[in-house]
Image: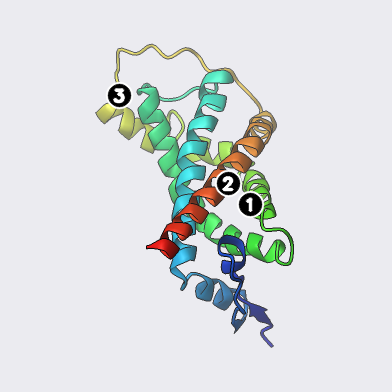
Amino acid sequence: MTKTVAVPDINAVFRDRPTVPPVHKGPLGAVAEFYRDPLARVTLLVTSLLLCYAGGAAMFFVHAIYFNEGGPAISPYLHWALDSSFGFIALTPIIAVLLPLTIWLVRGRPRWLFPLVLGLLFAVITIPGPLAHDMFVARGTPIASFVTHHFGDHSIVMPPPTEYTALAKMTHQFVAGLPVYVVLSIVAYGSIRAIVGRWHTS
């Protein structure tokens, strides 16, 4: 028998008027109902853009520049755009699950916990991110080779990358990513509350 699940109440986090959410059979039905609210869809878009592109810029600096993990012979801006777009495509479905999950986890608690928990969960989820990056968009992969061929500068002499173990790369990701993702989740939270405020006054 399918267990009934209450739809996470996004209004309790972003509006000052919590609602009584409907109940659906199974978590998939609850998530689908959650995204029937336009506020949930806006929250997903804003949060995903910030975490993947602004967060991607920070993690590009950490991995490619600070730790010299290497990359294709393309401009750093294109490198960031490539990595961040890959992250946006891969991680938006995960963020779509994390948002209602986080609201469910902080229900009945101060709503300022929402961005902190979301940032923490996202940092944990993205620990294997460097391994996925190396598999799909790192130097030598078909995608990176295509981008380098069409948009790269073949005169660039890339320095040899510093070799790290998979564990070291994942450690870099979590240690650097945790504060970045928490801060960006707070920014997303504040931005969405500002959007909601404009909706109410318009």
Q: Look at the numbered disc 2 and give the secondary structure of its residue.
A: helix
Measure the C-alpha gap from mark 3 to mark 1.
36 Å
Label 1 sits on a secondary structure element that is helix
- Residue 156 percent coordinates (x, y): 34, 13
Q: Would you call the spot at circle 2 few (<14 residues within 10 Å), some (14-19), or many (20 or more)? A: many
Label 2–label 1 contact, CB within 8 A: yes
Q: Which residue is mark 3?
A: 152
- Circle number at residue 176: none
Give the amino acid type for the residue marked by disc 2 in the picture.
Answer: Ser
Which residue corresponds to the image point at 39% horizontal and 36% vertical from the top-left?
82
Number of the label disc, if any, that sits on residue 185? 2
Position of 107 with respect to 126 (left or right) is right
Q: Is residue 25 left or right of residue 40?
A: right
Residue 2, compared with residue 176, is above or below; it is below
Mark 1 highlights which residue? Answer: 118
Please state which of residues 201 and 6 is positioned toward the viewer in this rendering: 201
Q: Earlier in the sequence, mark 3 or mark 2?
A: 3
Rendered-image quadrant of the N terminus = bottom right
Q: Considering only order in the chain, which callout, 1 or 2, is on the residue closer to the N terminus?
A: 1
| Outermost right residue | 109
Counting from the top left corner in percent of width and height, residue 64 is at 51, 24
